[in-house]
Image (spheres, rainbow, N blue to C red):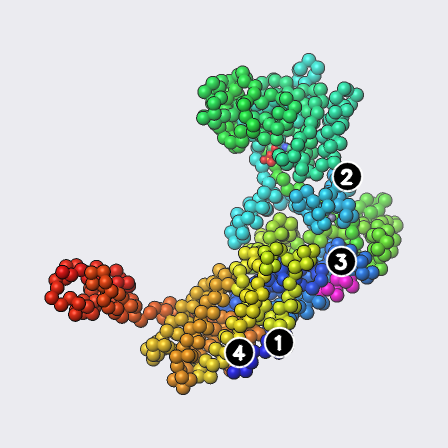
Amino acid sequence: VPVYDAGAIEEKWQRVWEERGLFRAADDGRPKKYVLEMFPYPSGDLHMGHARNYTIGDAMARQAHMQGFDVLHPIGFDAFGLPAENAAIKHRTQPAKWTYGNIDQAVATMRRMGFSYDYDRMVRTCDPSYYRWGQYLFLKMWEKGLVDRRTSPVNWCPTCNTVLANEQVTEGRCWRCGTVPERRELTQWYLKITDYAEELLDDIDRLDRWPERVRQMQRNWIGKSEGAEIDFALADASGEPTDLKITVFTTRPDTLFGASFFLLAPEYPLVHELVDGTEYEGAVQEVIDIAEATSAVDRQSSEVEKHGAFTGRYMVNPVNGRLLPIWVADYVITDYGTGAVMGVPCGDERDFQFARKYGLPVPPIILQEDDPLFDGLSGQEDLVVTDVPWDHAMDAEGVMVQSGPITGMRGGKRSEAAKAVVDLLAGRGLAREAVNFRLRDWLISRQRYWGNPIPAVHCEHCGIVPVPEDQLPVTLPEGLDLAAGETLAECPEFYETTCPVCGAPARRETDTMDTFTDSSWYYLRYCDPHNDHEPVGRAAADRWMPVDNYIGGIEHAILHLLYSRFWTKVMRDLGMVSCDEPFTDLLCQGMVKDENGEVMSKSKGNVVAPASVIEPYGADTMRLAILFIAPPEKDFDWDPQAVAGCNRFLKRAWKSVWEASCSATPGAEPSMDALDDEGRKLLRAVHRLGIKCTDDYGRRQYNTAISALMELVNAGNAYLAATASGERDGALMARYAHDLVAMLSPVCPHWADELASEALGMEGSMYDEPWPTFDADLTREDTVEIVVQVLGKIRARIQVAPDAPREELERAALEAVAPQLEGKDVVKVVVVPGKLVNVVAR
Ligand code: ANZ
Ligand code: ZN
């Protein structure tokens, strides 16, 4: 048996695979399988998280190929972005140079890992041949009315020196650097993702092979609220309604009778008109200032203290004419609903806290039957009680009280009472059903250099005009002095241009696009990466899309996965693809932690570099360990002992295959009848464990699939130990060795191909072999052992067929214990099929 020299074997097979172009998608009419891992940001060499991600995808892709699919398994790089600029400044180089250098290094590691990528399809988003099509798609969206440029308050990260999209502010902080963003009023470019809000929400129901928590996160982010708009009139000094109406959005019209104040966002345009020059101006201005300094997330949180001020004016409640004092409150935000709210402290927790803080009434209008207030107020239509002995609002359904004509009805979201209130006011035109989404348009402007330039020109005469398609790409200039803070806006060679419409001198747009635009359609480009006249050919897109298996981190649950869904739908509506959704099956892999259960990170200094495993053990051991330590979607703790154990297993299996192959008759099919007991045992194990392993692969439970193969090696070795080499069954040995190697090949492909070619004498790669098939009928044991008791004492053991009928068991048992029954009368025989027979005798 030759020694298992992983280093030499792996180098050899990586070369052979490449020479043969083994991983090129064939496009030969077999059913397709598009397996994709989220492409990396090339910030340095690959880390263990990448290695895990790609190893999972690679096992999937390789097995799919063996199962007869035409497999597309590409890789590329999400190559634009701020870290390249920061690194360039630090190392006094250019972002392009740094980025391409890192890409080379990452690709070398990928090759060293033996991943089955079709490298001819590699996409690097910073290549002009890619980003020109991003610009082209931007222009197409512009034509379709999906691009907007508008002035509004935006999140500005002072550390990253750029604006951020809403999705990039996570828990109130910049997603990249953790700085709390400032709010600035700026004119920026937007993509109108909100035009697709309804479809993006509805189609989540169809993504039944996505993790439920990702679907729920997307639903919450899109945040559809159904309710009503209700118009209130501003009261004049004598409390009479004026013509000035302010509309609120509410999800609880049923609570209208319980409104005890009226709230405006501090930024609401009318606020100054109401208070300027009055005694209330100062206090209101204070709230405006507090609101400006607080993040939107904190403002809306029920944990954060609320601030408000009375404006001195009142609104008229349209259902009963009561006057509601108008307050400004920092927890009301301008860019949701209408920016105005009816304050119902009985039903809304934030309103409740606000009412308690400022001493406003809390009239109970919805109660549960077991509430101490209920008996007294049940059926009460007029307002007689204006406070409650509670610490919190009542945010459950209940029965309406003190609520005029809806008293006694059941209240709650979309309740009978809610509908009745809207009907009550609809006749006078004062209420209507309304829907609101939390989702905001996608702010894509970035004031950074290393990104895709927005293809627009600002002309004094013609306004903002698109760059004509035949002038694409707008190429990034090189040689900016980034360390000196130079940006595109300070680079005349870039921004000085002429207007494509009138020819007058004009200024090029200097914002670049959010890098999430680059990652929103790269998977489509992989389908047709060399197309130089369109982003992707329709036939190629329809051949491969949607991605069948997408594997990546949970951190993209909203950002990338939502943007990509949007982008796919837009490209569908542009006639470029047929599918509605880009990713059919999503697997979010767990995190890689160190031995102590801490997430590996550079800052903690606990990173295990893939090279530190590949060097001593080889890539196959690394891949095996990654898949064996934990199922893909679970976190795992890095375990050097388990890695060493995996390496020992590969050596043991290597030896077992070699020994078996020495007595193997390749191509012969073993027959149960021709085998002795030891042989039958092994053949049954091959079929039983083969079925289990195949099933586990199907469920992506690679760890248990590998356990089954470990058990198979034990069974094989037991046979080898029990038989002399001359008496082994050749067909059995061939089947055992072949199936073991085949089933381990998606995980340890070099190991497998070396054995296939050297020990099993096969030509070509296991990658091209069909996945072995198994027969459940051959897993059944020939006989089972049955315990025979007499009066509860074990007296004999018998061997019978596993499906032997009751009568036969009884007969065989009585025969076996005949000596013990001498001279006794059998009173009763208890049979537990498959287990025991108990004889009761006197
Ligand atoms: C009265 C009311 C009574 C409300 C009640 C709730 C419970 P979602 O579900 O998130 O859509 N609201 C409306 N616009 C707002 C804004 N711009 N800033 C802050 N809050 C706003 O929430 C809708 C509810 O949030 C609306 O329904 C409104 O309060 C408040 F028992 O109206 B509700
Ligand atoms: Zn930042």
- Residue 802 on the magenta segment: no
Mark 1 nearby-residue class (10 Å; few <14, some 14–19, many ≥20): some
Task: Give the structural element (helix, strand or loop) at label 3.
Answer: helix
Q: Residue at x 69, y 31 (%)?
A: 330
Looking at the image, tell me whether mark 1 or mark 4 is earlier in sequence order.
Answer: 1
Disc 1 is placed on an element classified as: helix
Residue 755's disc number: 4
**Which type of secondary structure does the marked residue at label 2 adopt?**
strand
Instruction: Decide which of 62, 176 is in the foreground and name it.
Output: 176
Judging by the rendered image, the residue that carries numbered circle 3 is 84
Q: Which mark is residue 185?
A: 2
CA distance separating discs 4 and 3? 43 Å
Assign the magenta stretch its main secondary structure: helix
Q: Residue at x 59, y 60 (%)?
A: 595
**Residue named by callout 1:** 7
When the figure is inspected, residue 301 is found, relative to residue 629, above or below; the finding is above
Amino acid type, residue under disc 3 in the picture: Ala
How dense is the environment of label 3, judged by Cα within 10 Å: few (below 14), some, or many (20 and up)? many
> Is 205 above or below relative to 479?
above
Identify the mark nearer the N-term, 4 or 3: 3
Q: Using residue 131 as the reference point, say whether residue 743 is left or right of it.
A: left
> Which badge, 3 or 1, is on the more N-terminal residue?
1
Report the residue at 52% width, 59% height from top.
631
Report the magenta residues as a range: 96-103
